[in-house]
Image (tube, rainbow, N blue to C red):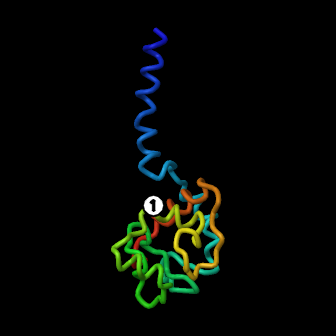
Amino acid sequence: MIKHIIGASILTLLPVLAAAESHGGMEGDAEKGERVFRKCQACHAVGEGAENKVGPVLNGVVDREIASVEGFEYSDVLKEMGAEGKTWTSEELAAFLEKPRDYAKGTKMAFAGLRKEEERADVIAFLKTHEMGE
């Protein structure tokens, strides 16, 4: 009986674990991410009418080619990544947001990073709610 209960519990958890794994190990909360994004607003904009600031507009950033916003002058390292065809997947964004200067040595981004995995997942979930051309 115990084996049956344990087996059923594991089967119930498998879809949850698979979903978490497919999102860099953690599913983010867009509402919490909106609050985390306040740390980014001095340099980045999202939403309708957003324009480049010190950093590029982040509408549509998830799954977008790195260094591809028209009219923004990126650092050489990000230009090289874009030229290699790299994209801002959720996993790449999470790595960059953790420690931007370690991820892209030579980046112009002065932000130290988001140390908490949950904050990174939340802000990525928030960014996913903003499509290109908003």
- Residue occupying the point 53% across, 54% down: 28
Tally of numbered discs? 1
Residue extending furthest left? 85
- Residue occupying the point 42% across, 21% down: 8
Residue extending furthest top? 1
Q: Position of residue 42 (x, y in %)?
A: 64, 80
In the picture, measured across the screen, residue 22 lies left or right of residue 116, that is: left
- Residue occupying the point 43% across, 80% down: 67
Could you tell me which secondary element the residue under label 1 belongs to?
Answer: helix
In the picture, measured across the screen, residue 130 lies left or right of residue 84, that is: right
Q: Is residue 70 above or below residue 25?
A: below
> Quarter of the image containing the C terminus?
bottom left
Q: Position of residue 68 (x, y in %)?
A: 40, 81
Q: Quadrant of residue 38?
A: bottom right
- The local crowd at label 1, few if under 14, some if 14 to 19, many if 20 or more residues have their Cα within 10 Å, is many
- Residue occupying the point 49% across, 65% down: 93
Q: Position of residue 81 (x, y in %)?
A: 41, 76
In the picture, measured across the screen, residue 117 lies left or right of residue 90, that is: right
Residue indicated by mark 1 = 90
Q: Position of residue 114 (x, y in %)?
A: 63, 63
Question: Observer-nearest residue: 120 or 83?
Answer: 83
Q: Amino acid at mark 1?
A: Ser
